[in-house]
Amino acid sequence: MKRKRFLAVACAAAMIASMTTGLAVNVSAADEKSDFAGEELSILVSAGWMDNRYDETIKRFEDTYDVTVDLQTIPADQYSDLLQSKLATDSCADIFWIQSSPFAIESTIVDPEKYCIDFTGASWENIMPETRKESCVYNDKLYGLQIWNASPEYVMVYNKTLFEENGWEVPTTYAELKDLCAKIQEAGITPWFMPGADGWQEQLAFFQIGGVYEEATPGLYDALNENKATFADNEKMIEVLNQFKELSDAGYFGEDWIGTDSTNMSNEFGDRNCAMALANSSFIKQIQEDTGTSDEFGMFLEPLGDNTWYPSSNSGPTMFGYKGTEHEDLVKEFFNFVTTTESLQEILDNSPAYTNLDVNDDNLEQHWLPEEQEFLKTVPDEKKTVVTLQTGTKYTNDYWTQFGQDMVAFCQGEMEANDVLKNMDTNRAEAAKTVGDENWK
C-alpha cells in the first residue's frame, strides 16, 4: 500500500453517482489516471474516526488514480488544537475532519466559506439522510460529508450471561445502579469500566442523557441556545455530576479509572473482569470477535439522574475539503469515490464495531445485531425525541475535552460540581463571541 501514515503521539508543532442508486461515479477512473498520477492527498483526522475501516477503500483509490494518500491520525486529546493551528496558519491537510453537529461548522471552523470547499450540488449529497446533512450545511451551502452509523450510541452495554448467573437485575434508576455496583464489586468484578485516560469517555456519562435535563427544565435547550439559561446552578446537572463522583469514590469505575484507557476494554469484558460500560451498541460485536467469548450481551439506558431517555444524535465525525488545497479536483474525486456502494460496503464490512451505516443506499447490505434490534424495541418512540446535550446546544461539544478534564478534577476533589458547569458557561460564551452570536452580545 502506498499510503503514508502519521500517528502523532505528542504534537510539538501546533494538528456517488446518483445517490439513489449508489452506483460508482468514477466509471471513467482508469481513463483519468493520468490526470492525478503522482499526486499526494493528505487527510487530517482524529484517532477513532477512520481507523482500519477505510483501509481497503483508500488503497483502491490510490491504485485507481496512481496517487498516494498521507493519512495523519492525531490523538483525540490533541486533535482540536492542532486543527485550529493548521487552519489559522493556512497549512491544513487537503481533507480534514471535525466532530460535526448542526452548530459545529460555525463554532469549530468559524469561517467555512474561507476554509472549506463548497460541495453544493455534489452527486453524493443525497446519500446523507436529512438529519446527517444538517451537520454538513452552513448558510444553505454543503461543505461536509458525514458517513456514520445509526446504532444506539453510548448506552450501557452489559454482560447478560454474567447478570443471569448472579441474579443481577438491569437497573432503571440511580439507586438501583448504585446497589447493583456494590454487588458486582463484592463479586470481585469492576462494575462499570470507565477509561478515563482516553480523554473523552467520562463526559459521555453526563452528556448522553440530555433528555433528562430537558425533562427537568422544559425548554432548556432553546434557552441555552438563546443565552437565557446556564449550565451553572442547574439542579439536575449538579445531581448527575455528584452521582458520578459518588460512583468514582466507591471504586465502581475500577481501580485508577482516571489512568486507564480503552485499549483492553473488549478483553476486560471477555475475561469477565468488568460487567458494564458505556459503549456503542455494536461494541458487542467487537467483544465477541476479539475474545471469542460465548457470553451474551445486552444494553440498557444509562440511569444517572434516573434517566429514561434514549441518546438520539444528529452528529458524527465529518470530513471537509480544505479550500486552500492545491489538489481540489483530487479531493472532490475522493469524496465521490468513498460514497459509491462498493466503498460504503467496504467501510462497513471493515469496521471493527459498527453494524450499519446511516446512508440512503438500498444496495448496501447492513449487519444489524439482534441485540441492537431487541434493545431499540424497548425504548418508546417518544423517548427518542431529545438529542444528546452536546449536539443539541451551541458551542458545547467544542469544549468536550475541557469538560472531561474538569470532571476528573471534580472527582479528585480539586473543584466543586458547579464550578465544572460554570467553566462550560465561560467557554461557550467565549465561542459565541468568536463567531459573533447575537444572543451573547
Image: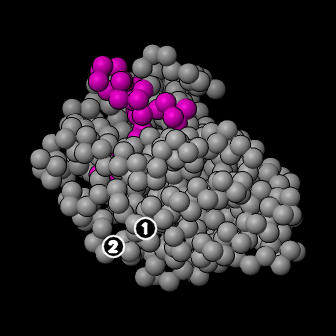
Taking depth in this image into account, of 403 and 147 the one nearest to the observer is 403
What residue appears at the point 30 percent right and 67 percent down from the top-left corner?
Answer: 220
- Is 29 left or right of 327, judged from the image as shown? right
Q: Amino acid at mark 1?
A: Lys
* Residue 100 sits inside the magenta stretch: yes
Taking depth in this image into account, of 181 and 41 the one nearest to the observer is 181
> Can residue 129 be seen at all in this image of the molecule?
no
Q: Residues within 10 Å of mark 2 (few under 14, many from 20)?
A: some
| Residue 415: percent from left, percent from top | 48, 44
The quarter of the picture where residue 302 lies is bottom right
| Residues drawn in magenta | 75-104
| Residue 19: percent from left, percent from top | 39, 58
What residue appears at the point 50 percent right and 63 percent down from the top-left corner?
Answer: 240
| Residue 432: percent from left, percent from top | 22, 45
- Disc number for residue 306: none
| Residue 100: percent from left, percent from top | 38, 48
Taking depth in this image into account, of 29 and 225 the one nearest to the observer is 225
- Disc number for residue 236: 1
Q: Secondary structure at mark 1?
A: helix
Tell whether label 1 touches label 2 (CB within 8 Å).
yes
How does the figure colour the protein chain or chains?
A: one colour
Height in image: 194 above or below 436?
below
The earlier-in-sequence mark between 2 and 1 is 2
Q: Secondary structure at mark 2?
A: loop
Q: CA distance from mark 2 to mark 1?
A: 9 Å
* Residue 221 sits inside the magenta stretch: no
Q: Residues within 10 Å of mark 1 (few under 14, many from 20)?
A: some
Q: Amino acid at mark 2?
A: Thr
- Is 325 left or right of 169, judged from the image as shown? left
> Can residue 253 be seen at all in this image of the molecule?
yes
Residue behind mark 2 = 217
The quarter of the picture where residue 379 lies is bottom right
